[in-house]
Amino acid sequence: MCIVKKKIFYAVIVKRCIDLVVSFLGLILLLPVFIIISLIIVLDDPGPVFFKQKRIGIYKKTFYIHKFRSMKTSTPKNVPTHMLLNPEAYITRVGRFLRKYSLDELPQLWDIFVSNLSIIGPRPALWNQYDLIALRDKYGVNEIKPGLTGWAQINGRDELPIEIKACLDGEYVQKMSFLFDCRCFFATIWCVLKHDGVIEGKIKQ
């Protein structure tokens, strides 16, 4: 019972305080970067700067996640990029660079600030990824706040079958702590630098 209470205290109080401080500082310090990226996006491919998509949050409540737009406005909606048959036809020139270094994810600092996301946690499923959502129910994953990055992301990301992804998300629920979150955070930086686990196109079975 004591361990459960500590986990709840960390998840509800400590993580939220960390998320709030880090996201606020990130939004302030990275404002010039936001402006530059926004201008480049518009100059490269006229259209909205930001892209939003319906996702599943804590307790399976839906919310909209925000990203810098890296794909053309003609791209099919609500389809993960790795499931597109020919994603290269939709990704813009600037988008390739943004996605390579995960810069398209920066606007999610706002989602963290308003408490839809945490810095570390399972990546939020699309609203229509029913199989993943159902599997996550088995592991209690839908009972915690999703994150910008997480345990599954540093262990395969797009390469993972949904069964393995859900299992890794469940493992995160069991191991969630400050030290484990730090491990996920720094491992994410390493994965981004190496571009690990990103697949631009439909996975061949």
Image: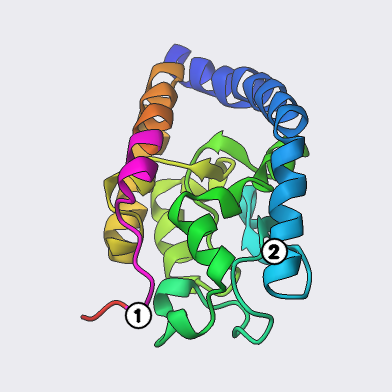
Q: Earlier in the sequence, mark 1 or mark 2?
A: 2
On residue 14, which mark appears?
A: none
Identify the residue shown where x is 45% and y is 80%: 87
Q: Quadrant of residue 181?
A: top left
Identify the residue shown where x is 35% and y is 60%: 198
Crowd tier of the residue under label 2, counting other residues whose Cα lies within 10 Å: few below 14, some 14–19, many 20 or above: many
Please indicate whether residue 5 sits to the left or right of residue 22 in the image. Answer: left
Q: How is the image coloured?
A: rainbow
Pick whichever, 14 or 160, lies toward us.
160
Q: Which residue is mark 2?
A: 41
Q: Quadrant of residue 136?
A: bottom left
Which kind of residue does numbered mark 2 sit on? Ile
Eyeballing the image, is 74 above or below 17? below
Q: Which residue is mark 1?
A: 202
Q: Could you tell me residue 44's position as x and y percent?
A: 67, 70
Over which residues does the magenta segment extend?
189-202
Q: Could you tell me residue 18's position as x and y percent?
A: 63, 20
Q: Secondary structure at mark 2?
A: helix
Q: Could you tell me residue 199's position as x and y percent?
A: 34, 67
The quadrant of the rendering that contains the C terminus is bottom left
Eyeballing the image, is 151 above or below 43? above
